[in-house]
Image (spheres, rainbow, N blue to C red):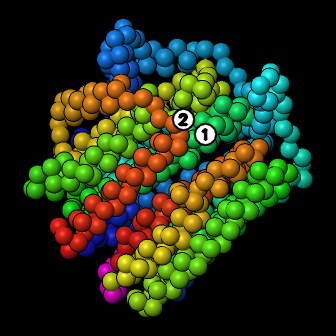
Amino acid sequence: MTYLSSGTDMIAELVLATLFGLLLLGIHRKLIARIQRRPGPPIWQEILHMLKFSFKTTWVPITASPTLFVGVVLIAIGIWSAAFYVLVSGGSLLVILGIYMLHKIVEHGFGLSSGSPYGKYGGVRSVISAASEIPLFVSVAVIAVFTHSLDLSSIMQYQQVSGPLLVTAFPAACAMFLVILSKMPFGPFSIVEAKELVSGYKTEHFGIWRAGLEVCNGLKTYVLLAVFLTVFIGPLTLPWLLAGMIVLIVLLAFSCAITPMMSPFDSVTIQMMVTGLMLVYAAVVLVVVHP
Amino acid sequence: MITVTSIGGIPYYILEFGDELVYFTPYTITLFLLALTFTVLVIISRPEKQVDIAFGGDAYRAKDISISEMRFRRFMAIACGLASMGAMVTGDIFNFTLFTAMVGITNVGIVAAVKSPHVQDAAYQYGLVALAATVPLFAGAAVYAAATGSLSMIELMNGTLPTVPLIAKAMLVIGVIGEGMAPFYAAKAEMFRAPGAPYVIMCSLSSLLIFLRVVEVVMLG
């Protein structure tokens, strides 16, 4: 990862990361369409969406809690900007994963603030699927056991000496891949955006508020994929990092395209089963590999 | 052994009151700021007017919240925010368990004034689970004190104390999970039928923050 030297660089990288994240989401959508034998939108469609929504008329619904309706958009962008900063400065992995979990609250806030039943059900589904985050923390615990640290910079140093964690802690990488999959649109765990809920938690947010949400989604995608590569592959130069993110998004697109969306109950059950398996794996690592 | 700097980052500031202390690391300050932001939102926001759809027809209605109900729920939501903030920055295991128990109580309080049988039933069931969870929660803190002779997280970080038994960590985690994480979340999810965001958001935010903090706590010592 590159390290930033000034505030201007930071803002420039933030903007580029957002645009690249949106491009990745466009590639994801295009690939799903092609696998399902549909033409699909162009890969820059998500960027166009963000720009289009930025200039559309908007308002706050009469049933909404106005301050929360607007404030939650700013919070969404704020937390992922903070995660991006932690990533590029080689900070604590725990902070990034904490922010990842707090994104649930943002989704909940989006859904509940509008007063719409569709948004509310989307928000509630987001909260009940919090089970998907528990494997994430088991993965973190396993990484801590291997590397004796949770600093991204230390984790990268460990991998330079001992090889990628993708090999030595493969089940942890699988669990984290599943966690990222649960955040991807059109995936098996995307119950918060199911079609029976219109657009789920984001149903009532449109115009500039939706553009803000698109920015958040782009940044979130970039950060999550970059964290995966940093934690399980090691330090990469920028071209390799971007190439790795494209490979990851292709894998995610295949997973999403060939798997039907689950019911909320099945989604949570499978995530809890993965949590159980990860706990067994963590126990084995703790007792056998690193007693 | 995981060092102090590698869990939540290097503490920016430590405020000591004898054995009691408060500290801010990049991790705890992130969680604290989130709790503070949502508490401010609770204070300045007017509640939503939840729209209910009658299935099988085109009818819908918006629920209005009375001023007295709004005031009570806002008070409980602010109390919940304050308890969450305390739990995020405290450096004392016992204080952490106290703040966690207070979060459980205020969560019930946030929806207690809602006149809906579904919400009241859910709050009652959640209250029972949260009540039962205080036993392992406080027992976990007691085992921490008995095994190490201290409840200070800073001392646990420094690695100068005896190793914390796994059972103490497990009890602490079970206690926190009982306060509102999966799988006990089922009862709590029903509480979100209650109208009036942003107050009900504090129910989920506080549980999530407490869970995030306990992850850091159990990795110490």
Q: Secondary structure at mark 1?
A: helix
* Structural distance between the alpha carbons of marks 1 and 2: 7 Å
Which residue shows up at 40% across the image and 88% down it? B148
Residue A251 at x, y percent in the picture: 27, 30
- Residue A273 visible? The answer is yes
Is residue B166 part of the magenta span, yes or no?
no
Q: In the depicted view, which residue is nearer to us: A106 or B40?
A: A106
Q: Which residues are magenta?
A: B156-162
Mark 2 Cα shell of 10 Å, populated few (<14), some (14-19), many (≥20): many
Return the mark for residue A20.
none
Give the side of residue A229 with respect to residue B186, left or right.
Answer: left
Residue behind mark 1: A123
Mark 1 Cα shell of 10 Å, populated few (<14), some (14-19), many (≥20): many
Question: Quadrant location of residue B105?
Answer: bottom right
Residue B181 at x, y percent in the picture: 54, 59
Residue behind mark 2: A192
Quadrant of the snapshot with the C terminus of chain A = bottom left
Residue B17 at x, y percent in the picture: 55, 83
